Amino acid sequence: MDMVNNRTLTQIVYKARQASEAPSPNMGSRGAAVAAALVLDRPGWLAEMGYMRAAAIERVGPEWVALFPAAANQLRADTHA
């Protein structure tokens, strides 16, 4: 993984971790909130923000979406550590 992707993955994990501790995904940045909802598999949050899953994926873009499995795995590993 190159440095840019590693930095982006770190950002996604950080935002998802913040969001996981909140009752809703209101995090300032709409893109970060949508990404967190996708990584955390929170379709209710997407609905609250007015997104269906396909539109949410389009919103964050393919580069971020490609990192979501790694972000989810890292969050899961952190939970079980």
Image (spheres, rainbow, N blue to C red):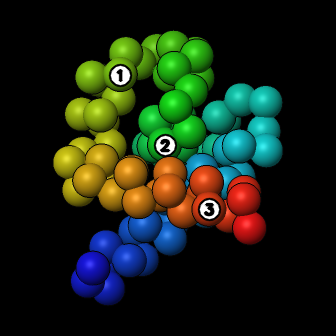
Rendered position, 5 above or below 25: below
Q: Earlier in the sequence, mark 2 or mark 1?
A: 2
Rendered position, 8 above or below 63: below
Q: Which residue type carries mark 2?
A: Val
Q: Nearer the viewer, residue 75 or 49?
A: 75
Rendered position, 18 above or below 37: below
Left or right: 66, with 30 as reference point: left
Q: Which residue is mark 2?
A: 39
Disc 2, SS: helix
Image coordinates of residue 15 in percent, x first then y, are: 60, 55
Q: Which residue is mark 1?
A: 53
Label 3 crowd (10 A; few <14 / some 14-19 / many >=20): few
- Kindly tell me whether residue 78 is visible in this rendering: yes
Between the C-alphas of marks 1 and 3, the distance is 25 Å
Q: Earlier in the sequence, mark 2 or mark 3?
A: 2
Label 1 crowd (10 A; few <14 / some 14-19 / many >=20): some
Q: Which residue is mark 3?
A: 77
Q: Which residue type carries mark 1?
A: Arg
